[in-house]
Image (tube, rainbow, N blue to C red):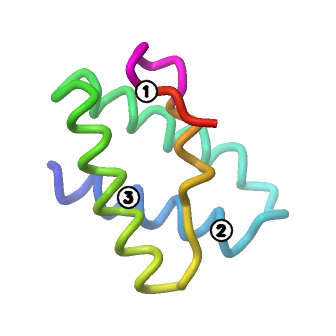
Amino acid sequence: MDFMLEEEMIDLLTFCLQNPTSDELESKKSRFTEIGKELFNDGGVDAMENFFFVVDNRIQGEIEKSPKNFRSLWNGICDEWNHP
């Protein structure tokens, strides 16, 4: 399951970064937020941090764009996660 969520996160964020004006952007962001909630429910903030770290590195390596601005979509899931 972890591998599947990681791949889905990569697909979602890559799409968002490569298609910033797409009509699908909001649904992709919404699904990304749902994944954050699933990760938190399974492993807490550590799981969120670990997954985002791996996804960030893969995306930067593959398309040379940073998904870090999408971290804020997970704000509000827990008190410990607070990114601008």
Asked which quadrant contains residue 57, the reply is bottom left
- Give the residue number, with chain letter if any, for mark 2: 17
Q: Position of residue 52 (x, y in %)?
A: 36, 51
| Image depth: mark 3 or mark 1 in front | 1
| Image depth: mark 2 or mark 3 in front | 2
Q: Amino acid at mark 1?
A: Trp
In the image, the segment drawn in magenta is 75-80
Q: Position of residue 5 (x, y in %)?
A: 28, 51
Looking at the image, residue 71 lies above or below residue 5: above
Could you tell me which residue is drawn at 72 percent across and 55 percent down?
24
Q: Nearer the viewer, residue 36 or 1?
A: 36
Say which element carries label 3: helix
Looking at the image, residue 75 lies above or below residue 14: above
Looking at the image, residue 58 lies above or below residue 50: below
Q: Earlier in the sequence, mark 3 or mark 1?
A: 3
Could you tell me which residue is drawn at 50 percent across and 35 percent down?
33
